[in-house]
């Protein structure tokens, strides 16, 4: 199984929010998750937009989980720099 850290969409039309989750790479966007790491709420104030557990994220990266491009940008914005 190849794990991937990516976003899972929630919310309503024009009011989206996302959970940062670890999922099987082949599962659909809103499918079953392995673990939830945090959330990304693009409509909130700047300091409340991104919340995630950095230790869990590092643990999954150590287990060779890949990261989607969007989550990579979110992590880089919060100080967890990924190549």
Image (spheres, rainbow, N blue to C red):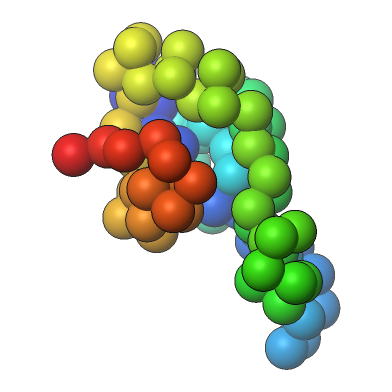
* Placement of 16 over or under 79, stated as above or below: below
List the single residue furthest toward the right.
12
At horizontal 49% and vertical 46% (from top left) the residue drawn is 78
* Placement of 77 over or under 12, stated as above or below: above
Please indicate whether residue 36 sits to the left or right of residue 83 in the image.
Answer: right
* Placement of 58 over or under 49, stated as above or below: above
Locate residue 11, reporting x and y percent.
79, 70
Q: Quarter of the image containing the N terminus?
A: top left
Locate residue 35, reporting x and y percent.
64, 25
Locate residue 20, reporting x and y percent.
59, 44
Kindly tell me whether residue 32 is visible in this rendering.
no
* Placement of 35 over or under 20, stated as above or below: above
Q: How many marks?
A: 0
From the viewer's side, name the closer residue of 53 and 17. Answer: 53
At horizontal 37% and vertical 48% (from top left) the residue drawn is 76
Where is residue 55, by image quadrant?
top right
From the viewer's side, name the closer residue of 78 and 73. Answer: 78
Where is residue 15, by image quadrant?
bottom right
Please indicate whether residue 18 sits to the left or right of residue 26 in the image.
Answer: right
From the viewer's side, name the closer residue of 6 and 40. Answer: 40
At horizontal 54% and vertical 52% (from top left) the residue drawn is 7
Kindly tell me whether residue 70 is visible in this rendering.
yes
Where is residue 36, by image quadrant?
top right
Q: Quarter of the image containing the C terminus?
A: top left
Locate residue 80, reporting x and y percent.
40, 35
List the single residue furthest toward the bottom.
14
């Amino acid at each position: 199984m190849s794990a991937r850290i990516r976003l899972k969409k929630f919310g309503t039309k024009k009011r989206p929010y996302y959970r940062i989750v670890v999922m099987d790479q082949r599962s659909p966007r809103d499918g079953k998750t392995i673990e939830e790491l945090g959330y990304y709420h693009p409509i909130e104030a700047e300091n409340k937009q991104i919340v995630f557990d950095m230790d869990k994220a590092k643990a999954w990266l150590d287990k060779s989980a890949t990261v989607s491009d969007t989550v990579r940008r979110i992590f880089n914005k919060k100080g967890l720099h990924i190549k």
